[in-house]
Each structure stands twice: as structure tokens, then as C-alpha cells.
Amino acid sequence: MKKIVVLILLLGLFAAHHHNIFAALHEHDKNLYEEEVKDRFEEIFLQRAKLFNSLLTENDLKPIEIKVELEKLETDPLLSEDVEIFTHIMEEPTCYELINGFNIQEFKVVGLKNNIVMIEVVLLWELMGLNEITFEEITYNVEMIKKQDEWLLMDYRLVR
């Protein structure tokens, strides 16, 4: 009986260790995730920028179309916030700068818990206003989650 209890406890410990990959991020783990997550991060931000620009340049987009596109890139809480913001932009258009592009200046995985990876990223945005092109460097704390073998943007915050 004791052997069975010990075996069950060991299996439980193994499963818990497998799902909580690490408490302190090791260099090897960091490198494995950085490459995979960085590519997906860049893809997500490119698609979000295209979607944002299309809100400003096209008049025939519908809120449901925006939500469908965002669901391919994001999950809550960011998904709900973005649907609300993008819908507001459609309903009350004003003068926004178009996103010409961005460049990832720094990208560092700083933590991982379960299927959520925490990233610190510095982006250099190229924005096109009415009369000029401007550049803006912004640091973000980003959270991405892996759902059904796909990394999705879960949240991000500006670092001041």
C-alpha cells in the first residue's frame, strides 16, 4: 500500500513539475522559448498593425470582422479590450497616425509559468502623421499564452 501511495505522489510531483516548468528561468529554457515566441510576437504585432491601419483607411469593416481577426492573435483580457477600442475607432474616427512599421530593439523572456510567458520587449515604432514620419521607442511588459499549440497575445503594458 505504501508503495502505491509513494508512486502516486511521485507521479503527481512529476506532473506538477511538468506543468510549472520553472520558478527561476534558466538560460537554456529561456533560449528555447525566446526564438519561438519572438517569431509569433512579431507576426501578431504585424497583423494588429495592419488591422489598425485598415480601420483608418477602409470604411467597409464591420466589428464582427475585427473580432474574428483579433481572435486569431489574442485572448482575454486583451481581446475584449481591443475589440472595444477598435470598435470605438470605427464608430468615432478621428486623426490617428498610421503605423508604417516597427523594429524589435530588445526581446527578453523574463518568466514562464504554466503556458504563460512573460516578456520584456522594446519596440521602435515608425508612425506616419499628416505631415511627417516620427519614430517612437517604447518598452512593454508582455504576456503571451500557449493555447492549442499556438502562442496568443494575452496582455501588454507600457513600462514607464
Image: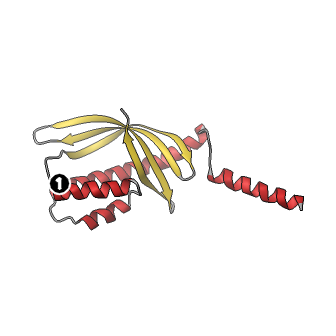
Instruction: Estimate the x, y position of residue 85 in percent, counting from the top left.
Output: 26, 54
Q: Secondary structure at mark 1?
A: helix
Residue pictured at 78% horizontal, 56% vertical: 9
Q: Which residue is mark 1?
A: 56
Residue placed most toward the observer, 22 or 27: 22
Q: Is residue 65 visible?
A: yes
Q: Quadrant of the N terminus?
A: bottom right
- Residue 67 lies in what quarter of the image? bottom left
Kindly identify the residue that appears in the image at 15 percent across and 55 percent down: 92
Look at 62% across and 41% down and name the residue there: 23
State the residue at coordinates (54%, 53%): 115
Label 1 environment density (alpha carbons within 10 Å; few <14, some 14–19, many ≥20):
some
Left or right of 97 in this view: 148: right
Q: Which quadrant would the C terminus be assigned to in this image?
A: top left
> Is residue 51 visible from the viewing direction of this image?
no
Q: Name the residue nearer the viewer: 159 or 123.
A: 159
* In front of the other: 103 or 86: 86
Q: Position of residue 86 (x, y in %)?
A: 25, 56
Up-down relation of residue 78 to residue 105 (above or below): below
The single residue placed furthest to the top in the displayed view is 160
Residue 102, percent across and down? 30, 42
Q: Is residue 146 above or below residue 61?
A: above
Left or right of 93? Residue 68 is right
Say whether residue 77 is left or right of residue 113. left
| Three-letter amino acid code of the residue under disc 1 | Leu
Q: How is the image coloured?
A: secondary structure
Name the spot of residue 113 as percent of width and height, x first. 56, 48
Q: How many marks?
A: 1
Left or right side of 104 for 100? left
